[in-house]
Image (cartoon, helix red, strand yellow):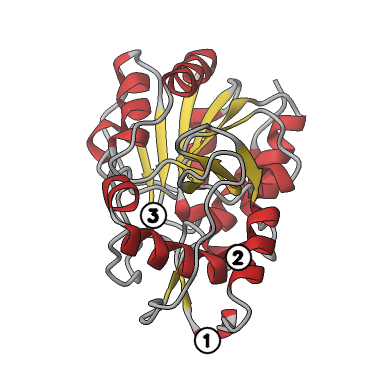
Amino acid sequence: MTKATRLGTVSDAVGILARTRLAVLTGAGISTDSGIPDYRGPDSPPRNPMTFQQFAGDQAFRRHYWARNHVGWRHMRTTRPNAGHRALAGLERRGLLSGIITQNVDLLHEQAGATNVIDLHGHYNEVICLTCKTVFTREHMHERLDEANPDFAVEVGDVEIAPDADAVLSDTAGFVVPPCEVCGGILKPNIVYFGENVPKERVAAAYEMVDDGGALLVAGSSLAVMSGLRFVRHAAKAGKPVVIVNRGETRGDALATLLVDDGTSEFLAELAASLPDL
């Protein structure tokens, strides 16, 4: 079994994680330094993300979501990896990671140069038809939304952005959402919504990634939802050390070997500089 949970520092984490390959689980907290707010950090405002049932079952909800996403996507595509993303990519290049499982949809791990990444909840730059399953690029959807809404001129700097490429808008009544070009069906961002299941093959690949590592490092996740917490439970049950770095408490604290209350960018950069090669 893992050691009893304790609070610690980067030096303590190095002592636990050195000389083994790490599986890494990241959440929204790793992207805050890139300008993307998180859901449940200590300073985050209350958020009520749209559920899959709301999106699929109500045209007004879909219209409202796509109007907000049309603004939020313009912000997301301009974000860049921060020191935390770059540190993990560097650890991967050194052969110190079994891989990265991310709950984020921002693709910043890939932009930083990481290659073995499981985007657990999908990513923001694809759109899928719920009927025929055709996948379109988000760039193409952006062009169609622009064409259908020539007078929609909300600027990114005028609204609050949410972690899933959403934006907080109050009035979206006149926004027009085009249907699928192939079958006329409902178009949805190709990300996993609240109330929607992560594809089984993606979950299985993530479990395998945890099994291939000698320890699990969690960075920037409150582990409030089961999609991430299950991997912490899996690692702890297997007797693997679990190190969690996050600002504030997480749902997995009782399962951790070590807790570090710190920002992920600083922690990961120092960790990468301190870990020896295998």
| Mark-to-mark CA distance, 1 and 2 | 19 Å
Give residue 278's position: percent from left, percent from top: 70, 20
Pointer 2 residue: 145
Vertical relation: 221 (above or below) 119:
below
Q: Quadrant of the N terminus?
A: top left
Which numbered disc, 3 or 1, marks the residue that appears first in the sequence? 1
- Quick check: marks 1 and 2 in contact, CB under 8 Å? no
- Secondary structure, mark 1, is helix
- Quick check: marks 2 and 3 in contact, CB under 8 Å? no
Pointer 1 residue: 158
- Tell me what residue is drawn at x 44 percent, y 57 percent: 262
Which numbered disc, 1 or 2, marks the residue that appears first in the sequence? 2
Nearer mark to the viewer, of 3 and 1: 1
- Tell me what residue is drawn at x 60 percent, y 43 percent: 271
Nearer mark to the viewer, of 2 and 3: 2
Relative to 142, 197 lies left or right: left
Give residue 224's position: percent from left, percent from top: 27, 45
Give residue 43's position: percent from left, percent from top: 35, 71
Give residue 104's position: percent from left, percent from top: 50, 47
Question: How many other residues sit within 10 Å of disc 2, few (<14), some (14-19) or many (≥20)?
Answer: some
Vertical relation: 221 (above or below) 162:
above
- The amino acid on which the numbered mark 3 sits, given as a three-letter code, is Asp
- Secondary structure, mark 2, is helix
Vertical relation: 142 (above or below) 112:
below
Pointer 3 residue: 261
- The amino acid on which the numbered mark 2 sits, given as a three-letter code, is Leu
Residue at the far front in the pictured view: 183
- The amino acid on which the numbered mark 1 sits, given as a three-letter code, is Asp
Nearer mark to the viewer, of 1 and 2: 2
- Tell me what residue is drawn at x 65 percent, y 41 percent: 88
| Mark-to-mark CA distance, 2 and 3 | 42 Å
| Mark-to-mark CA distance, 3 and 1 | 32 Å
